[in-house]
Image: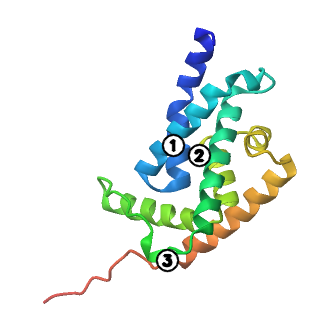
């Protein structure tokens, strides 16, 4: 492997970490997913053959790793309840923290295929073509999944209880 290839892989790490955190909702699981992705990319680098963008190839590896994990968890007998969703760290400003927490929880309620496409296009700023390459689906599928993901996310966000408390006048 050439030095510039190694540098290109290393340059993908911050984006991979962001995407993994969005997929898993858990920093430790996200770090494990990034490490598994990097190990797989490094060991299979000769298979890439420079046919497409390295970044899309890496995200495709991560997506496949994540889907394999989700499928393995579904096979387990003990299904986790919605109450077991991971807690999100508190941000410096209360209003922002509540909105981010609500968004994270709503994202985690989306099916993995919809969550993946909204994170790739919305957060990582992949083009539809790049997202299609990373996910291994046609561009039209990316577009329809993104539309459904946005609709469901909007519905979930609108259904959340308001975080505003009512003020009472004290005399």
Q: Residue at position x 63%, y 16% from top?
A: 5
Task: Please give the count of numbered marks on the rendered protein.
Answer: 3
Q: Quadrant of the N terminus?
A: top right
Contact flag, marks 2 and 1 (Cβ < 8 Å): yes
Q: Which residue is mark 3?
A: 81
Q: Secondary structure at mark 1?
A: helix
Question: Callout 2: helix, strand or loop?
Answer: helix
Residue at x 60%, y 11% (from the top left corner): 4
Q: Residue furthest bottom?
A: 171
Residue in the foreground of this view, choosing between 65 and 11: 65
Mark found first going from the N terminus, 3 or 1: 1
In the image, 84: left or right of 139?
left
| Residue 18: assigned label | 1
- The crowd level at tag 3 (other Cα within 10 Å; few <14, some 14-19, many 20+) is few
Q: Residue 150 location, x and y as percent?
A: 68, 62
**Residue linked to disc 2:** 123
Q: Nearer the viewer, residue 12 or 46?
A: 46
The residue sitting at 43% across, 63% down in the picture is 101
Against 28, residue 60 (above or below) is: above
Expressed as whole percent of the image width and height from the top left, the position of residue 88 reads 38, 60
Instruction: Identify the image quadrant of the C terminus.
Output: bottom left
Query: For the residues carrying marks 3 and 1, which lies nearer the camera in this image?
Result: 3
Compared across the picture, whether 94 is left or right of 30 comes to left
Q: Nearer the viewer, residue 136 or 129?
A: 136
Going from N to C along the chain, the mark reached first, 2 or 1, is 1
Residue at 31% in and 58% down: 90
Quarter of the image for residue 151 reads bottom right
Element assignment for label 3: loop
Does residue 84 lie above or below 119 as drawn?
Answer: below
| C-alpha distance separating marks 3 and 2 | 27 Å
Q: Between tags 3 and 2, which lies in front?
A: 3
Residue 112 in sight in this render: yes
């Amino acid at each position: 492997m050439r030095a510039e290839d190694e540098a290109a892989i290393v340059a993908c790490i911050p984006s991979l970490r962001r995407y993994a955190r969005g997929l898993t909702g858990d920093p430790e699981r996200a770090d494990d997913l990034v490490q598994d992705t990097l190990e797989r990319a490094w060991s299979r680098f000769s298979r890439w053959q420079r046919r497409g963008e390295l970044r899309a190839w890496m995200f495709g590896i991560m997506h496949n790793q994540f889907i394999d994990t989700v499928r393995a968890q579904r096979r387990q007998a003990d299904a986790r309840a919605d109450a077991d969703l991971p807690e999100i760290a508190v941000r410096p400003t209360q209003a922002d923290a509540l909105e981010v927490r609500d968004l994270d929880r709503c994202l985690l309620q989306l099916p993995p295929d919809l969550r993946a496409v909204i994170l790739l296009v919305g957060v990582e700023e992949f083009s539809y073509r790049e997202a299609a390459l990373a996910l291994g689906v046609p561009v039209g599928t990316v577009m329809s999944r993104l539309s459904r993901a946005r609709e469901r996310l909007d519905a979930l966000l609108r259904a959340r209880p308001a975080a505003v408390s009512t003020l009472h006048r004290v005399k």
